[in-house]
């Protein structure tokens, strides 16, 4: 089996091989090279990582990042996508992506993966995979990969929250994994447990401790909607978890973590004004509100920037500010040198003055 070679710059073209309904509002599908000659080619990535898909919708290329749920070294990549309100790309995939259709794919990336787990044997050998809804995908990849490794002895507690029994993604697969592996334990909490034996309610501190008595001593990987993740982080901290052993990811736009800038009167007048964003290479110029995200201005200027996660995670929107003032809420994927040179993630960069920008 040879490894798939990702282009060093830009996306690969892969084809949707199979697509099926996972629940009433989510689908799974696989991607592989189109050519039949490529069927011995496998994909390498670290369980927990994501890929960025580019799909043409209404004549415009749209990019989004999605976590992989398959294992490394398989001939197809698998993803599961859930319908979301206003989710242009997700809903297109659920409703319209066809088997045989080509999509652009940027190589796997991301720092939320099992190789991050604690080096401390006591913690790293016992983990909690905690998820809600479609946040199950990266942790499913982690669980399957660890269980498939005969030399691995990690004890895995898989805790998942869903709305109802028929909305549990990978439900039967999870039960089969628990049946086959004594070191894999599954706990499921439902908002509405009608028709099941699962507990109904929210994953409170008490519920987490009840499911997994030694939860505070484990390395934890958390993925799900932002509100869920905030609540779980608080619960785990309250239960005494060492947050050095805690990792999380969510593809949701980041809130600013910059302190509010103290404005004097002159600045206040300025703040009501627009700044000018200039991208010389494309001869593009556009107005942007002070404090707004640079990505919005670049998109308004029709500069070909890719914004796949809009959360400061994937690095696809990297560009360089050559003049002007700005703040950053994420520097994920940027090196120290790049930060010093003025590289930013446009989705996580706030405009503070007129800017001149170069795409990398
Ligand atoms: S779009 Fe992913 S980091 Fe900006």
Image (cartoon, grey):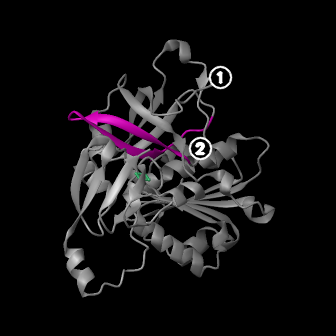
- Which numbered disc, 2 or 1, marks the residue that appears first in the sequence? 1
Examine the rendering and report whether any part of residue 177 can be seen. yes
The magenta stretch spans which residues?
49-72
- Name the residue: 58% across, 56% down: 337
Question: Main SS of the magenta segment?
Answer: strand
- Name the residue: 33% across, 35% down: 55
Percent coordinates x, y for residue 348 in the rendering: 40, 61
- Name the residue: 24% across, 83% down: 266
Quadrant of the rendered image containing residue 303: top left
Q: Is residue 50 magenta?
A: yes
Look at mark 2 in the image and give the residue it sits on.
176
Instruction: Kindly check if marks 2 and 1 are in contact, taking CB atoms under 8 A apart as contact.
Output: no
Mark carried by residue 2: 1
Asked if residue 9 lies left or right of residue 63, the reply is: right
Q: Is residue 180 magenta?
A: no
Percent coordinates x, y for residue 264 in the rendering: 29, 87
Find the distance from the CA under tag 2 to the CA under tag 1: 30 Å
Examine the rendering and report whether any part of residue 195 can be seen. no
- Name the residue: 53% across, 49% down: 138
Q: Secondary structure at mark 2?
A: helix
Q: Quadrant of the N terminus?
A: top right
Quadrant of the rendered image containing residue 28: top left
């Amino acid at each position: 089996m040879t490894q798939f070679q990702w282009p060093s710059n830009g996306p690969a073209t892969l084809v949707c091989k199979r697509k099926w309904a996972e629940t009433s509002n989510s689908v799974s599908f696989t991607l592989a090279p189109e050519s039949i000659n490529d069927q011995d080619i496998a994909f390498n990535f670290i369980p927990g990582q994501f890929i960025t898909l580019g799909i043409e919708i209404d004549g415009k290329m749209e990019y989004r990042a999605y976590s992989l749920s398959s294992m490394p070294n398989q001939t197809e990549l698998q993803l599961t996508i859930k319908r979301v309100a206003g989710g242009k790309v997700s809903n297109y995939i659920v409703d319209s992506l066809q088997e045989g259709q080509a999509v652009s794919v940027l190589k796997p990336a991301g720092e939320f993966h099992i190789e991050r787990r604690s080096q401390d044997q006591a913690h790293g050998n016992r983990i909690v995979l905690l998820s809600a809804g479609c946040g199950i995908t990266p942790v499913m990849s982690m669980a399957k990969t660890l269980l498939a490794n005969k030399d691995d002895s990690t004890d895995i507690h898989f805790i998942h929250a869903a709305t109802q029994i028929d909305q549990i993604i990978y439900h039967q697969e999870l039960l089969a994994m628990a049946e086959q592996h004594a070191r894999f334990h599954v706990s499921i909490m439902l908002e509405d447990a009608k028709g099941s034996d699962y507990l109904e309610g929210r994953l409170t501190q008490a519920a987490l401790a009840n499911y997994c008595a030694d939860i505070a001593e484990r390395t934890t990987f958390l993925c799900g909607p932002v509100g869920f993740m905030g609540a779980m982080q608080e619960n785990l901290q309250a239960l005494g978890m060492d947050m050095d052993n805690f990792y999380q990811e969510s593809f949701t736009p980041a809130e600013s973590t910059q302190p509010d800038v103290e404005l004097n009167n002159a600045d206040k007048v300025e703040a009501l004004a627009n700044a000018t964003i200039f991208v010389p290479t494309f001869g593009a110029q556009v107005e942007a509100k002070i404090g707004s995200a640079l990505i919005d201005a670049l998109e308004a200027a029709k500069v070909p920037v890719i914004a796949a996660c809009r959360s400061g995670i994937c690095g696809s929107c990297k560009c360089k500010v050559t003049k002007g003032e700005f703040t950053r809420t994420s520097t994920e994927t940027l090196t120290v040198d790049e930060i010093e040179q003025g590289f930013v993630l446009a989705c996580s960069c706030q405009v503070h003055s007129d800017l001149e920008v170069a795409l990398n």
